[in-house]
Image (spheres, rainbow, N blue to C red):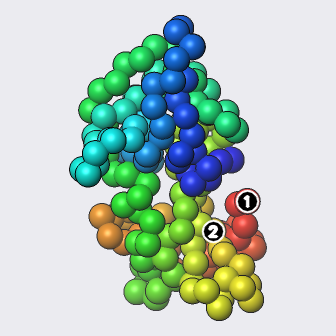
Amino acid sequence: MRRTREIVGLPVLNLQSGGQVGWVQDVAFVGNEVAGVVLEGGGLFHSDKGIPRSMIVAFGKDALTVSEEMVQEIKGTRWSQKIGNQVFTQGGDAQGTIQDVFLDDSVSRIAGYEVSDGLFADLVQGRGAILQQNVMVDGKDVLIVEDEVSPWDHGKEGGSLS
């Protein structure tokens, strides 16, 4: 399992030429699927250009490798747009805010979310996790989960993913 935070900032290397394509600025999602990585824009405005997931060969610890340099527009919700979104239960109880997105081992799908209930709670009990299977609505500004799910319940519903 990978944290999206670990991928942002990595260099992207072309396996055919050996050259560097750029740096990962963000990761884009369409639904629960990884659509691709957005490359740094180099200007004042965010770029929508990046590498689609299908062209990425490997997500290494120190770099991403691509089979060919196919830079194109990457659509979808970005990781940076999910960070800070509030998490609520179906019944309307606040569970905290999203601090990171966990990805499956193949870096193809969202596995879950790291949730914080504030600095003091993080220090005392640590950050929690919500598994993707317990998410009911992944909205633009909010994540709604099943009522019985708690990010700090180390049972089957929530708990630590790290």
Does residue 112 lie above or below 149 as drawn?
above
Find the distance from the CA under tag 1 to the CA under tag 2: 9 Å
Front disc: 1 or 2: 1
Residue 29 drawn at (x, y percent): 40, 46
Q: Which residue is mark 2?
A: 129
Label 2 secondary element: strand
Between residues 27 and 46, which one lies in front from this camera angle?
Answer: 46
Are the residues flagged by discs 1 and 2 in contact, CB closer than 8 Å?
yes
Seen from this angle, which residue lies furthest left? 45
Q: Residue at x 42, y 77 (%)?
A: 86
**Nearer to the camera, 80 or 21:** 21
Judge the density around disc 1: few (<14), some (14-19), many (≥20) Cα neighbours within 10 Å: few
Label ID, residue 162: 1
Residue ID at (63%, 68%): 129
Residue at x-position 45% and y-position 25%: 21
Amino acid type at image mark 1: Ser
Provide residue 135's location: percent of width, then percent of height. 48, 64
Instruction: Give amino acid for label 2.
Output: Ala
Q: Name the outermost residue toward the top.
A: 16
